[in-house]
């Protein structure tokens, strides 16, 4: 079963002279851990937004779990994303006014199905958050600290636990290791693999650092599948 399937997908930002995405076909199978190398200007952020249902495609299909996101209205896409997708962002996007466990539990407040799946694992959301944080090797003494007092590596583990809570079908990691040294990066990725396997989550990991690619089931160069990206279209200038 394909978790992600893109078919004849194109996207062009308003007022842009050409497409930033032009992909004939791309799939990610259930349970795969795929490394997608996406240098700046090849359409990486735009593609992730399409897969997440933030924007509908210009043409073609974006199928996630066999569901055509382009045929859903915005509210249905938002709910589908909340129910089935977990995200680890480059800057982590943790909320400083929430505790560590509150940050981890946050997705379950937007999705009843993720909440139910989390509670099937533990007696409470806080207990499930602590379980994930332990598995990701965050020292329990740090759980009660404000997140902005944690190191980058510690915040990264909190962000990963937040993405994984409620067993999302797909986890998307967008440059989550860019601020870490090489040894810490590899250690974190192996922990992330372990948790994705445990939670039955597929992983799409996007990075410009090809040194990490050998750890994954498959390595894909975005420029090879995105015909628009080969023309060095600067996606960022059309997002304002």
Image (cartoon, rainbow, N blue to C red):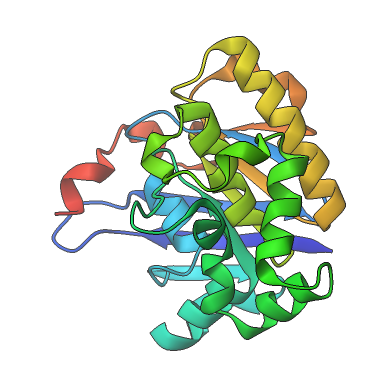
Q: In which quarter of the image is residue 122?
A: bottom right
Residue 228 visible? The answer is no
Direction from residue 199 to residue 106 in the image, left or right: left
Q: Which of 212 and 101 is in front in this view?
A: 101
Whether 179 is drawn above or below 182: the answer is: below
Left or right: 32 with respect to 105?
Answer: right
> Is 197 rendered above or below residue 199?
above
In the rendered image of this protein, does residue 8 appear above or below residue 161? Answer: below
| Number of numbered discs overlaid on the protein picture | 0
The picture places residue 230, in percent across and down from the top left corner, at: 40, 32
Residue name at image x 45 percent, y 41 percent: 227
Residue in front for this viewpoint, 120 or 84? 120
Residue at image location 16% in from the left, 44% down from the top: 237
> In the image, residue 183 lies at what x, y percent?
64, 11
Q: Nearer the viewer, residue 112 or 209?
A: 112
Q: Is residue 32 positioned above or below 175 on the image? A: below
């Amino acid at each position: 079963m394909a978790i992600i399937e893109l078919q004849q997908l194109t996207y062009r930002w308003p007022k842009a002279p050409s497409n930033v995405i032009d992909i004939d076909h791309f799939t990610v199978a259930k349970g795969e851990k795929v490394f997608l190398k996406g240098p700046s200007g090849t359409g990486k952020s735009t593609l992730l937004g399409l897969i997440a249902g933030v924007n509908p495609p210009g043409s073609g299909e974006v199928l996630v779990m066999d569901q055509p996101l382009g045929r859903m209205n915005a509210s249905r896409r938002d709910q589908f994303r909340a129910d089935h997708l977990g995200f680890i962002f480059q800057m982590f996007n943790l909320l400083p006014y929430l505790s560590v466990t509150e940050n981890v539990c946050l997705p379950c407040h937007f999705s009843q199905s993720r909440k139910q799946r989390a509670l099937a694992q533990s007696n409470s959301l806080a207990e499930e958050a602590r379980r994930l944080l332990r598995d990701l090797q965050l020292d329990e003494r740090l759980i009660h600290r404000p997140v902005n007092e944690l190191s980058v590596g510690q915040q990264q583990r909190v962000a990963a636990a937040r993405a994984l809570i409620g067993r999302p079908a797909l986890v998307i990691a967008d440059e989550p290791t860019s601020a870490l040294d090489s040894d810490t990066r590899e250690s974190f990725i192996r922990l992330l693999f372990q948790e994705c396997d445990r939670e039955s989550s597929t992983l799409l990991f996007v990075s410009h650092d090809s040194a990490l690619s050998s750890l994954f089931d498959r390595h894909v160069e975005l420029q090879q599948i995105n015909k628009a990206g080969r023309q060095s279209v600067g996606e960022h200038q059309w997002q304002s």
